[in-house]
Amino acid sequence: MLDTLIPLAVDGLASAALIFFVAVGLTLVFSVLRVLNVAHGSFYSIGAYVAASVGLWIAGAGLNPWLSFPALILSAAIVAALFGPLVERCLMRWTYGKSEAIQILVTFGLFLILEDLQRIVFGVSSLAEDTPMQLLGSTRIGGVIYLNYQLLLIALAALVVIGLRVLLTKTRIGRLVTAVVADREMAQSIGINTNRVFILSFSLGVFLAALGGALATPTAGAAPGLGAETMVLAFAVAAIGGLGQIEGAALAAIIVGLARVLAIYFAPELDAVAPYIVMLVVLLIRPYGLFGQAATRRI
Amino acid sequence: MLRIEGVSAAIAGVQVLRSVSLGLTSGRTTILIGRNGAGKTTTLRAIMGLLPVQGGSVRLDGEEIGTTPAYRRAAQGIGYAPEDRRLVPEFSVEDNIVLPALALSLPAAERTRRLDEVYALLPQLKTMRKRPGGGVSGGQGKMVALGRALMVARTALLLDEPFQGLAPALALDYARTLGDLKRSRPDLAILVTESTPALLDAIADETLQIERGEIG
């Protein structure tokens, strides 16, 4: 049984790593901007399409195939640079302090726009480009074969958890972000340019979502409909962890990943709903998520 | 010299300030008295640039700053301590106090100079500087918020109801500190709002009344 479960677990954790990138971006944007961005999953699928296109271009141009690794990260950076400042300045800023209903409607509108934009730019067919996975090959441990690329994904997710924590607690910009999260008006009145903090945080959130999508292409490719699917999963993970919680999102991603593995093994028909069953149970016991606390909002 | 002239403001459609004018001068302490809801906090927030105003002007040393964002007004030396202390709970007391230095990118020497100045005025902050911002009492939090505002204040200091919710002993302490501040920082124009001004008699140079958004 372990021989089957452990490879499944690696599989589950690797997909959890991808969802984690999206969920942590969602949670970061939510805590700084206080807007639940329903279109966040679209940045995942755009990241996937851009990365697949860049990868195919590298292969087509006969460039060194190892370039496809930095290309994954570069693709996410391109998406973040293109959409982050633009969407935050032109759209998100108008929703700050508005009711949740307006925020959800506006970002849902953005989601529809981005989905159509993808169809116009990339068409409706799926793209596959698996050079990075092929290059890394696989490892055989105790008679079980693991894809090295999947192990890399898990390591990268751990690195992002640590990196974000260091960024928020040790760097100047991170400390300013923390102050804005604690109290926006106080932050302004002690000299913090909150608009800059919003642009940076939103762009970082877009980057993380796009990074998830880009890193998913070598194993899963890019396909239409990816955005909506990812958004729902990422939201479940963010809610389980507690909105605004980095480590919470990481733990929640692991739990969801493992829950899906167990479901595949013991009750395959529950595979798709497993994350939401976990979410239901967690939120019934802890309404603000595993790491979340009821916010003491001041007026 | 900080001067506001004919400033009006509305919050959610309700007129809160009606053509308010007042002037602050270096070395002088102005007290703004009014009941709850009279517009005291809104006056301070308007000076700080934290809410949009309808017409009127805000001038700092003759320069119109009525449309500059709050963070730039902080950079121009206007310090503001809101009525609720609003500390960052995850940061230590000292990190809360030096946060403006980080925000304003002050050079290390200047940051140390201002921090020493704050500790000289409020020595009790130095003894609790390592405690988390979320773990101090309401009264102590007000002191921290005052220290933080002093890191910013080079020209003007705006204090919103500093005695609100303070135990009598702490309130006396706070009032004494304001007296010390007035003597040690003649460069500062100080504006304090209060609903019960008795404690401020000793330091008040000018007392203004605000009622229904109008200064009488």
Image (spheres, rainbow, N blue to C red):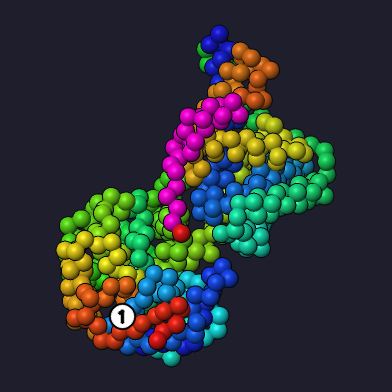
| Residue at the disc numbered 1 | B31
Vertical position of residue B167 compared to residue B198: above or below? above
The magenta stretch spans residue B106: no
Q: B72 or B124, which lies in front?
A: B124
The residue furthest bottom is: B62
Q: A22 or B160, which lies in front?
A: B160
Vertical position of residue A19 compared to residue A170: above or below? above
B121 horizontally vs B162: left or right: left
Q: Helix, strand or loop at disc 1?
A: strand
B18 horizontally vs B44: left or right: right
Q: Amino acid at mark 1?
A: Ile
- Residue A292 point in image, percent of width and height: 45, 40
- Residue B75 point in image, percent of width and height: 41, 75
Q: Which residues are magenta?
A: A276-298
Q: Identify the residue shown where x is 64% and y is 51%.
A: A101
Q: Identify the residue shown where x is 44% and y is 43%.
A: A294
